[in-house]
Amino acid sequence: MSMAVSLVLVSGIMHAVWNMYTKSSRNKNMFLLLTHFFGFFIFLPFFIHDIQEGIPLAGYGLMMLSCLFQMGYAFFLPRAYQRADMSQAYPVMRGLAALFVPVLGVALFGEHLSFIGWLGVSAVVVGLFAIGGIWNMPKGRIVTYWPLLGVGLSITGYTLTDKMLLNYISPLSLLELANIGFIIMLGRNVSVLKDAKSEWKENWRKIILGTVLTPGSYLLFLFAMKLGPVSQLAPIREISTVVGSILGVWLLKEAEGLRRVAYSALITAGIIAIGVWGA
């Protein structure tokens, strides 16, 4: 289990970095499209190999479901970052998944969290929402941030689906589903040549790094899910929010830095509780 926790912690840090790149990009739709476009060709051979080896009908059903959730993620994520600071949007989006995944993981997979583990999950969720300022958000403003809810539900959906899908295809092949979902969703309404050229010229280094960090982050989490329960590992991955909040305040010069960093300590305490005493 210690190996799984280590993989998830590194995964969370990588996830925070590529989200910062997305937030700071000029054209967020095109930035995400380019990172997944290059990733499509990298992981295509693994996807073809698994199909040639044979996948049962149930596996294809889960593949379609996972791809749909990834399309939802691709639809909502750019809109979320257009409406809120990274240090506000990122914790709320991740907090929703940190809340839903353990509850549904226990219900769907018969997993178990100790009492201290559930206290840790509660600390993580409260800390995430507090950093995001959701408690003090006016009702009318909450409505304008509906993409954050969409991202949280999409993350929950593909995380639980992919846990089951790992029984049928490899983690490397599963990453191709994310690439396909993002390309379908983001490639619909953009003037590809013009926007791609300008985004590449301005952010080509970040696009290359994003091509590595985006699948690399989730790949580590997929390997971890083969080693341990998703209800315990998913909240631990929210170390990404601690990193993301610090990056948002430090590098993107976002407001309320001290308050958000302070709540990060609560999240970290919850993560430690889950990782050490959660089983």
Image (cartoon, rainbow, N blue to C red):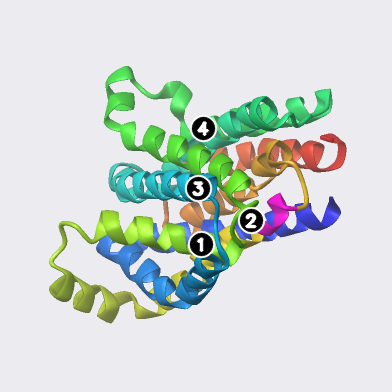
Q: Tell me, yes or no, whether the two marked residues, 1 and 2, touch with CB atoms within 8 Å.
A: yes
Q: Any mark on residue 57, and which?
A: 3
| Magenta extent | 222-226
Q: Reading the chain from its start, which is encountered first: label 2 or label 4?
A: 4
Q: CA distance from mark 2 to mark 4?
A: 20 Å
In the rendered image, residue 214, in percent from the top left (x then y), is placed at 49, 64
Q: Position of residue 221 (x, y in %)?
A: 64, 55
Badge 2 amino acid:
Leu
- The disc placed on residue 175 is 1
Between 202 and 215, the one lying in front of the other is 215
Residue pointed to by mark 4: 96
Q: Where is 224 relative to 123, above or below?
A: below
The amino acid sitting under disc 4 is Leu
Instruction: Say what secondary structure mark 1 lies in.
Output: helix
The amino acid beneath tag 3 is: Leu
Of the image marks 4 and 1, the number of the one nearer the N terminus = 4
Name the magenta segment's main secondary structure: helix
Q: Residue at x 16, y 75 (%)?
A: 193
Give whichever of discs 3 and 2 has the lower sequence position: 3
Q: Which of the pair 9/82 is nearer the observer?
A: 9
Q: Comparing marks 1 and 3, which lies closer to the viewer?
A: 3
* Residue identifier under label 2: 222
Q: Nearer the viewer, mark 3 or mark 2?
A: 3
The answer to whether 118 appears left or right of 38 in the picture is right
